[in-house]
Amino acid sequence: MEQTDIQIQTCNEMAVHISLGQTISPHIQRQVRAVGAYIESHPFAGYKECVVSYTAVTIVYDPFIVRTQEKTDNAQQFVKSYAQQAVQHADMDSLPQARDIVIPVCYGGAYGPDLEEVAQTLDMTPEEVVRIHTSGTYLVYMIGFCPGYPYMGGLDKQLWIPRRQTPRLAIPARSVAIAGQQAGIYPMETPGGWHLLGRTAVDLFTPDADTPSLLQAGDVVHFKAITEEEYKQIRGDRP
């Protein structure tokens, strides 16, 4: 992998941080995923997990196990050397093909209480906001904030809007939202400061499933507008 602008730094005695750049872009996101995939498939003794973000990967490890089982006096230096190896051997071409996932959304009303305000702020009609939002192609850069929450790029510039000045203490589960240049979906009820355009009828996080998070980094998302009746049909008896 090309190693321009890559930095490997110590976070603490149990974590090493690999920065792959300073710009949020699909290319750097693929680099991040490739490094993460290499680490997951080539764990060292004492490896616990890797956490991927927009432009970086953090390796979390147990220094005691690294020292004893990898037979090194300096666990931190060992993991930093390993991180360099991961960057060198990561292969973007080996990444699986991106999944294309359609998310059905009921916009406005009780499902999207900020749609009217967003439209007014952006000097649009609510219908225009929905049209632009559903016309976009969104890349899932990372999962974070809470289990299953997708941070997505690809929001049309016409919909870029600052976060709400006053965050809500409780946002309903499955709320579809925008803020700044990003789009997201709240998998569960949680506080938040993004603008709520609608609500999806599908669950984003199912704890007892083999793969709890519906979306993964690298997925491509399209939003589809549905009626309230269609929303209720998809939800069925689920709360």
Image (cartoon, helix red, strand yellow):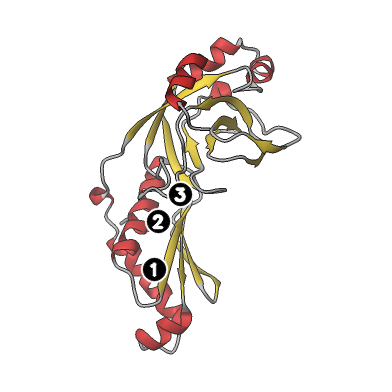
Q: Secondary structure at mark 3?
A: loop
Residue in front for this viewpoint, 67 or 1: 67
State how far apart marks 2 and 3 are (Cα).
39 Å
Q: Kindly identify which residue carries mark 3.
A: 207
Q: Is residue 100 visible?
A: yes
Total numbered badges shown on the rendered structure = 3
Q: Residue at x 34, y 64 (%)?
A: 39
Q: Kindly identify which residue carries mark 1.
A: 83
Mark positioned earlier in the residue sequence (1 or 2): 2
The kind of residue on which mark 3 rests is Pro
The kind of residue on which mark 2 rests is Thr
Is label 3 or label 1 in front? 3
Please say if the residues under marks 1 and 2 sit with CB atoms less than 8 Å apart: no
Q: Secondary structure at mark 1?
A: helix
Instruction: State the image quarter where residue 194 is shown.
Output: top right
State how far apart marks 1 and 2 are (Cα).
15 Å
